[in-house]
Image: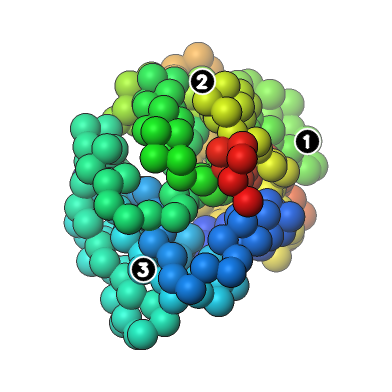
Amino acid sequence: MSGFSVEWLALREHYDLRARNPAVMDAAISALAGRPSLGIVDLACGTGATLRALSPHIEARQHWRLVDNDLSLLARVPLSSSAQLMITTVPIDLNHDLEAALDGPLDLVSTSALLDLVSDEWLQRLTVEAAARRLPVYAALTYDGRIEIKPADAADTAVIAAVNAHQCTDKGFGPALGPTAARAAIERFERVGYSVVHGTADWVFGPQDQDIQFEMLSGWAAAAREVGNMPLADVIGWLTRRRELVGARLSSIRVGHLDLFARPIGTR
Ligand SMILES: C[S@@+](CC[C@H](N)C(=O)[O-])C[C@H]1O[C@@H](n2cnc3c(N)ncnc32)[C@H](O)[C@@H]1O
């Protein structure tokens, strides 16, 4: 199990969709234009959010291979295939078998909310394996370390520092890149001869977005507790004050993400 619940992925999907950087998504779609059919592999697909975000904007016949190691998430991928859209799910542990996920006829590698979970070593593997196959890569929603919470609280800085420290712990791929992942990915793709289009894709939660704010704050408090740099009473006090503000519809949160589209130089 990966620890990403169906409920959490469903809650965030709307905000992810809204956050996706339109220029980066357009770059990915335009790079594929004119082909009658496409093979796309979505790495760490969850329940298929990237398929739902991208496929309606692609005119070609699409064959999606959705890869994840969590069977309960894969089981929720809607498999209603048509002549235009064929979907297969493949259980693969990407830490061990990335290469298997990339084998076969493919035109695009996509992923979302994955790169901040992986290690620098794994990221290097991804860029090298993609480059060996001359595959373009659309990687959306990589957390970049920026968190802004309004109104401010005296303990915000300590909690955010703990969250960013927690992001760098092992998420199944070795020590995670966490907040450094987005920049590292751009550099690594450029190093293997790709041109990279990138742009911010921030989550923006307004005062009305209470459910997702409650979830985020609880997750951050749990992360701060695990990291252990703050007295537990301070974490609890912070969470209590923050929850009161959310309950009163006085809280706004922005969480920084970056989208990128990388393609081998020399391809259209
Ligand atoms: C933050 S979720 C993102 C899911 C989906 N891409 C989305 O945007 O909704 C991270 C995903 O990575 C998957 N994952 C984590 N470790 C993995 C591994 N070793 N192999 C394959 N998938 C993995 C999880 O099961 C989860 O679906």
* 26 versus 165 height, above or below: below
Q: At x 78% / y 43%, what residue is drawn? A: 150
The crowd level at tag 1 (other Cα within 10 Å; few <14, some 14-19, many 20+) is: few
> Given this view, does label 2 or label 1 mark the residue nearer the observer?
2
Q: Is residue 151 left or right of residue 120?
A: right
> Disc 3 marks which amino acid?
His
Q: Is residue 186 visible?
A: yes
- Lower position in the chain sequence, tag 3 or tag 2: 3
x, y (%) of residue 185? 55, 29
Instruction: Tell me where residue 49 appears, x and y as whole percent.
Output: 46, 63
In this figure, which residue is indicated by the disc labeled 1?
A: 152
Q: For residue 235, which quarter of the picture? A: top right
- Figure check: 165 above or below 221: above
Q: Which residue is mark 2?
A: 165
Q: Nearer the viewer, residue 182 or 247?
A: 182
Mark 3 against mark 2, which lies toward the viewer?
A: 3
Direction from residue 265 to residue 41 in the image, left or right: left
**Badge 3 element:** strand
- Name the foreground residue: 6 vs 235: 6
Which SS class for mark 2? helix
Closer to us: 24 or 159? 24
Q: CA distance from mark 1 to mark 3?
A: 47 Å
Name the spot of residue 186 as percent of width and height, x first: 61, 30
Query: Of marks 2 and 1, which one's residue comes earlier in the chain?
Result: 1
- Residue 99 versus residue 119: which sits nearer the camera? 99
Q: Are marks 3 and 2 in contact (CB under 8 Å)?
A: no
Badge 1 or badge 3: first in the primary sequence: 3
Q: Pointer 3: what residue? A: 63
